Amino acid sequence: MPIFQADICHNEKTFEKLAHMQYDLFCKGNRTSRTMLSIGAIILGILNAESWWGMLAIGYGFYLNSSTYASANHTAHKLAKKIRETGMDFPCSRYEFTEQGLRILSLPDEKVTGKMVKYQEFLKLGEDGDYFYLFPNPHGGYMIAKSELADKDAFRSFLEQKTGKTVESRMPPVVKLLRKMKKRDREPHHL
């Protein structure tokens, strides 16, 4: 019997969101480099704004800043296009979280799609306002819609306890602070 259960039917938007989180979790060095290069190009351009190459540097800096997810979007859109071209439906799955691991069933036939994913196999966990993301490797992952869960905080705690990993969040800092305060309130008082 599953402790938590959630269904998802993918579409182009969910592929895109999954690709964005995958980039955020596994390409932090790339993102930092792009940000630093972007800031440098903009500053260099501003300092040399009278020349043509100064304006080019500013444009390049803004391009680097605004195209962070270009590669991730390309991959997601290419995958969605292949699914549409073959005439197949986007995948639908049921995720069952048991004590032993994650069992994945294809929908609507509810057939088990492979071996159970053990919690210790997950490399990274993430979340945004709508989904939890679980990555057993850098090349693919699973999305759990928060709307499918009765208690999002209990699910997050369950995942963190079972995997030994922290759920990394793209939430605003104030939401992260409130969550920490709420978690602290549930802990027993220490002397």
Image (cartoon, rainbow, N blue to C red):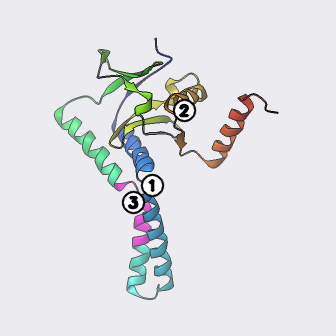
Q: Residue 60 lies in what quarter of the image?
A: bottom left
Residue at 36% over, 22% down: 116
Q: Position of residue 178 (x, y in %)?
A: 69, 40
Please tell me whether the stretch drawn in magenta is mainly helix, strand or loop.
Answer: helix
Name the kind of residue labelled 1 in the image: Lys
Q: Residue furthest bottom?
A: 50
Q: Pick whichever of labels 3 and 2 is earlier in the sequence.
A: 3
Q: Residue 87 lies in what quarter of the image?
A: top left
Q: Position of residue 96 (x, y in %)?
A: 43, 20
Q: Do the residues bearing badges 3 and 1 touch, measured as CB atoms within 8 Å?
A: no
Dot 3 corresponds to which residue?
Answer: 67
Residue at 46% over, 88% down: 50
| Helix, strand or loop under label 3 | loop
Q: Nearer the viewer, mark 2 or mark 1?
A: 2
| Helix, strand or loop under label 2 | helix
Q: Do the residues bearing badges 2 and 1 touch, measured as CB atoms within 8 Å?
A: no
Q: Residue 140 lies in what quarter of the image?
A: top left
Label 3 and label 1: CA atoms lie apart by 15 Å
Between 109 and 96, the residue placed more toward the observer is 96
Q: Is residue 184 above or below residue 75?
A: above
| Disc 1 residue crowd, few under 14, some 14–19, many 20+, Cα 10 Å | few
Residue 63 seen in the current view: yes
For residue 111, side relative to residue 158 (left or right): left
Q: Residue furthest top?
A: 1
Q: Nearer the viewer, mark 3 or mark 2?
A: 2
Q: Which residues are magenta?
A: 60-70
How many labels were placed on the picture? 3
Name the kind of residue labelled 3 in the image: Ser
Name the kind of residue labelled 2 in the image: Glu
Dot 2 corresponds to which residue?
Answer: 160
Dot 1 corresponds to which residue?
Answer: 28
